[in-house]
Structures are given as structure tokens and as C-alpha cells.
Amino acid sequence: MIKITEIYKSIQGESSFAGLPCTFIRTTGCNLRCVWCDSEYAFFGGKAMSVQQIISKVKSYDCSLVEIIGGEPLLQKEVPALAKALLEMGCTVLVETSGERDISVLDGNVIKIMDLKCPGSGECDKNRWENLAHIDRKDEIKFVLKDEADYKWSCDVIKRHALEDKAALLMSTVFGDLQPAEVVGWLLRDRLNVRFQLQLHKLVWPPDKKGV
């Protein structure tokens, strides 16, 4: 059984898939407490569902792009089996993870969207650097920036680990904190091969609206 906060169909708000229709499976529970978290409502509660029940709900949305999010999905041991079942249905499967859990448990065909927590998150010391060995070119590494110090930290990490050659790189700002134009200016100045992104869903709907 997997604890589920919500399952819904919307558009992808982030990543290289931004703007595309997507079915989201939001699991319950997270062991991190990032200061800018926008999904605290998924920390507790939820409904226990079997993999088959989740699959049936996903099928009802008739959408081949599916993302498993949280909370932190990899806290629940049945999530890799769920991801594999979705792949066997012919879905494109994304798993968004904090980067603190071991991502090697996921099927190699899952597209992993993994955070590297910047200092401004308050959880930088939780990064599992060993996960970089399990990332490949189809996967995406995300940096959420609270301030310029986070940007400088991210640039150092990208260069030190040669991440531009390892995966697609994403940078976004903490909503309402850092001005997007500042980050774009830094990226152009520094000639980084990074995709800048906004949280598209927060521009379409109110930032605190759930299930969209």
C-alpha cells in the first residue's frame, strides 16, 4: 500500500515537460523541511491505496505522461513498483525527488527529476551525492534558488561535478523571493547550459491552489 495525498490531471508546471498535460500522483510524507516548501499539506494524512487502485485512477485520466511527486515519493517502498507498472502501461514516468533518498531503486527507464538542495533551503547537508552516479542524460537535476548565494553554490556544484555533461539542468527561483530577471542575467553572463524555469502552474492558478 502507498499513502496518497491526491491524484489529479493538470499541466506540467516545471521541468523540460512544462506545459504538457500530465497526471500527478502525490504521495504523503516527507523527511525534509525546506524553508520554502509549498506542499506542506502532503506531510501528513493521506489515503492508503494499492498499486492497482492507483493505476485504475491514473487510467481514468487517459494521459500518457505521469509524474510521481510528494512529499518525498521514495520514502515509500512500493513506489518503484508503481513506477514500473506505469512504464509497462506505456506511460512516460517522471519521479520528482528531493535527492536525499537512494534513486537507484527506480527502473532505468524512469525519468528522475532530482533536487540538489541549495544552502537557502535549510537542507543542503541532506544531499545524497552518491545519487549522481545513477543519473543519466534523460534525467534532470533541479536547483531552487533563494538568493545569490544559492546561485553561486549551484554554479560551483555544476562545475565541480561536471553536471552539464551528466543530465539536463534546471534552475528556478523561490516563488516571491528572488527576481527571475536577476537569475536570467546571471545565467547569460556566465554562459551556463542551464534551463531557467518558472513554476508555470503558479502563474496560471493562484500559488496556493491545490490539485492543479
Image (cartoon, helix red, strand yellow):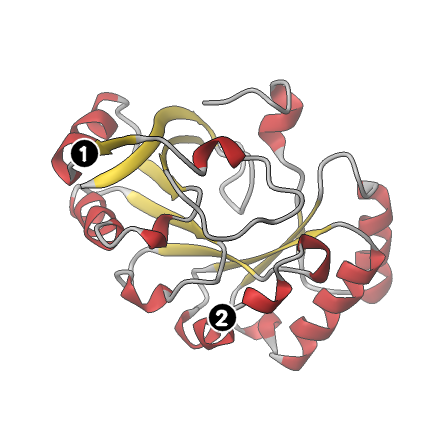
Is residue 8 found left or right of 79 in the rendered image? right
Discs 1, 2 touching: Cβ within 8 Å:
no
Is residue 97 found left or right of 104 in the rendered image? right
Residue matched to label 1: 55
Q: Position of residue 97 (x, y in %)?
A: 45, 53
Quarter location, residue 47: top left
Mark 1 vs mark 2: in front = 2
Q: Report how many numbered discs are placed on residues in the image.
A: 2
Q: Position of residue 78 (x, y in %)?
A: 21, 50
| SS at mark 2 in the image | loop
In this rendering, is residue 153 above or below 49? below
Tell me the residue at 29%/59% (across/down): 109
Q: Position of residue 6 (x, y in %)?
A: 36, 27
Three-letter amino acid code at the position of disc 2: Arg
Quarter location, residue 14: top right
| SS at mark 1 in the image | helix
Front residue of 197/149: it is 149
Mark closest to the chain's N terminus, 1 or 2: 1
Residue matched to label 2: 128
Tell me the residue at 55%/34% (across/down): 13
